[in-house]
Amino acid sequence: MKAVVSFLVVAAIVAVSVFGFTKGAQADEIKMVGVITKIEIEGASAKTATATLKDNKTEQLVVITVNDDLTLDKFKDHRIVEGDEIRCKYEVIDGKNISRFFRKTAGC
């Protein structure tokens, strides 16, 4: 009986440590709503753009790198422009804020 209890305790410790390390290894996704103050596109055939948003809660400027084709097309044909309110999710990867979700709050 003591062997079974010991085994369960060890298994629980191993499970907690494995889940603790895997969560730490994942990049945390940050959500924000803000107004676009600046959009920079690297030319007509660019695969990335940067958008500077003013966070509605903190009033800080956040530069977000956008690399999905749908959002880039919206930048290029002016469906998303400076002054639009945006809801976005991003991850910090190698010191850059990489967009995972980038949409107008009113919809596009």
Image (cartoon, grey):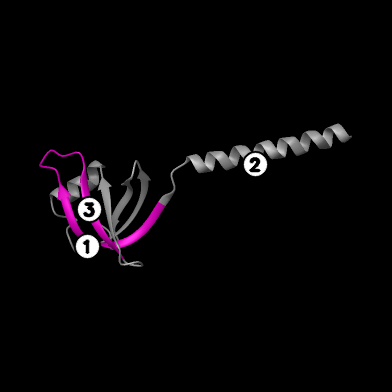
Disc 2 to disc 1, C-alpha distance: 44 Å
- Provide the residue span drawn in magenta: 30-55
For residue 57, which numbered disc appears in the image? none
Q: Which residue is mark 2?
A: 16
Q: Could you tell whether 24 is left or right of 95 in the image?
A: right
Question: Which mark is in front, 3 or 1?
Answer: 3
Comes first in the chain, label 3 or label 1: 3
Q: Could you tell whether 86 is left or right of 44 in the image?
A: right
Q: Is residue 37 magenta?
A: yes
Q: Amino acid at mark 2?
A: Val
Q: Amino acid at mark 1?
A: Asp
Tell me residue 15's x, y (percent).
66, 38
- Please rate how many residues cluster around mark 2, counting C-alpha atoms within 10 Å: few if below 14, some from 14 to 19, many from 20: few
Residue pictured at 25% horizontal, 46% vertical: 66
Residue pictured at 81% horizontal, 35% vertical: 6
- Please rate how many residues cluster around mark 1, counting C-alpha atoms within 10 Å: few if below 14, some from 14 to 19, many from 20: some
Element carrying mark 2: helix
Q: Which residue is mark 3?
A: 51
- Vertical arrangement, residue 98 with respect to residue 31, above or below: above
Residue pictured at 26% horizontal, 59% vertical: 53
Q: Which residue is mark 1?
A: 84
Residue found farthest to the left:
44
Comes first in the chain, label 2 or label 1: 2
Q: Nearer the viewer, residue 87 or 53?
A: 53
Disc 2 to disc 3, C-alpha distance: 39 Å
Tell me residue 104's x, y (percent).
27, 59
Q: Could you tell whether 78 is left or right of 67 in the image?
A: left
Q: Is residue 73 magenta?
A: no
Q: Main secondary structure of the magenta part?
A: strand
